[in-house]
Image (cartoon, grey):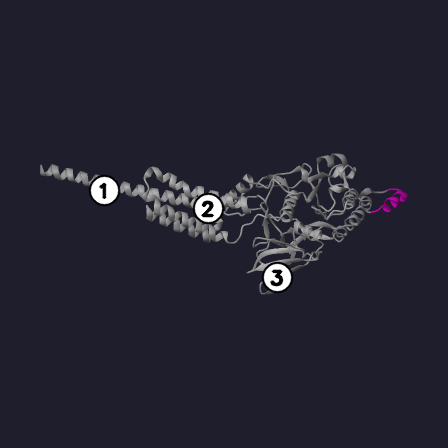
Amino acid sequence: GRRAAWAMLVVFVLFQAVVPSLFYGPRLALFDLYQYTAPRLEHANPVVIVAIDDASLKAIGQWPWPRQINAQLISKILAAKPASLGIDMILPEADRQSPEEWLRYAGDMPPALSDGIRGLPSHDAVFGHAIAAGPVMLGIGGLRVVEAKEDAGQLAPFRLIEPGGASTTPPPTLPRFNAALRSIPMLDNAAAGHGVLSVDPDPDGVFRRVPLISVLSGRLAPSMSLEMLRLTAKASWFDLYVDGGAVDGVGVGPIRIPTQGDGSVWVHFSPHDSRRFVSAADILSGRVDASAFEQKIVLVGVTGLGTTDLRMTPVGYMPGTEITAQLLENVLDGRLAQRPDWTRLAEPALMLIFGTFLIVTLPFVRPRWQAFLGLAPLVLLAALGFGLWQQSLLLVDVATPAIGEAFVFVSLLAGSFAEADSHRRHLRRELEARKIAEAKTE
């Protein structure tokens, strides 16, 4: 039994250390359980989401709206002096309801009417003027296409900092896009900031992490949340800290954010909270007090039925804009969920320690107590994992060592039972041989 258990322990620890992707499913399920059982319940509200919700669609009309209405919405928000304003959408085509666009498809009409319509201001020009009036960020979509056109649009600069000095090569661990989808130049050039909206989910389709930096056509590009922090801090560039070819953190103004090696951060989620949202219809009708946006980070997103980008998170579905808001809350509260590099060594070590404990002690325990002894490492691992999460927001995978302990326990008992069964069969054969010998002698 011990030989079988030692073999199982060694094989499991090697797989855990060398091929950790084998245990990706149980690990992520455990991290989701951390978030579900101990979510972020209390938080400040430095971020306000202006939602183009069902009530707004009912009051104004179907989406997309004419962009002079978008301009009114942005102007009313900027009049309240927010710290920054982010538009969580991409507008790659001209407004077809704009006068000059309408004339293209209107057909024949009297010259006087045509001249009058042509004299009306362009909706895109009005919207661009509203965007240029304040610290507004416009979204960029990252694309992975076969035939890519290199993106040369505006991006805030990065300064790469390594222990040996400054660097100019983006770390290879960052997510990469070979092309970009931007809003029309009239809007894109008017914005003070540009952030990448594209986020890849985990393999099971759940959004647990958000990249702060990506590589866009060979250039470093900030995410929407990082660009919003830059506009809020009135910073001119980002500091990207690199160590050993992996990202160690990113700095913006007075803030330094620790990241994973791929430049992403784990979001400490709270359940969907309606207090973050203000209806766009209420703003356009003047029913929202200006103090609701003063020195706040404001995000504008579409949440109306059939138009929202609902995404699955560990605490349930929520709009992508709300995920960005939660990440900004994490950063400003200084309470980010983390999975440090040392956990990749600590987790196989936990497996080795508890597995050795079982192999050494279990054979000396009476059978009726063996089940309790086998459960003890599982209880200790669960207490360790949930304790580290609640106290320090550390994501330590105790599910994989627990699975390994179960395999070691089963191997030890199965080997012991097989050995005992072998002894019984051997004794039975000896007994039968003696009986035959005695019968022959008699």
Secondary structure beneath disc 1?
Answer: helix
Q: Position of residue 204 (x, y in %)?
A: 54, 44
Between 365 and 123, which is closer to the camera in this rendering? 365
| N-term-proximal mark, 1 vs 3 | 3
Residue 15: mark: none
- The residues bearing labels 3 and 2 have C-alpha atoms spaced at a distance of 35 Å
| N-term-proximal mark, 2 vs 1 | 2
Position of the C terminus, as image quadrant, is top left
Is 113 in the magenta?
yes
Q: Position of residue 45 (x, y in %)?
A: 67, 43
Q: Say which amino acid is labelled 2.
A: Thr
Residue 12 in the figure: left or right of residue 126: left
Residue 161: mark: 3
Secondary structure beneath disc 3?
Answer: strand
Which residue has dot 1 on it?
Answer: 426
Q: Is residue 215 visible?
A: no
Q: Position of residue 193 (x, y in %)?
A: 71, 53
- The residues bearing labels 1 and 3 have C-alpha atoms spaced at a distance of 71 Å
Q: Say which amino acid is labelled 3.
A: Ile
Which residue has dot 2 on it?
Answer: 400
Asked if the residue at tag 2 contacts the one at tag 3, i.e. Cβ–Cβ closer than 8 Å, the answer is no
Q: Say which amino acid is labelled 1.
A: His
Front of the two marks 2 and 1: 2
**Which residue lies most toward the front here?**
391
Residue at x 46% of width, y 44% of height? 381
Position of the N terminus, as image quadrant, is top left
Residue 134 in the figure: left or right of residue 398: right
Between 355 and 217, which is closer to the camera in this rendering? 355
Residue at x 87% of width, y 42% of height? 109
Q: Is residue 109 visible?
A: yes
Reply above or below: 54 against 22: above
Magenta stretch bounds: 109-121
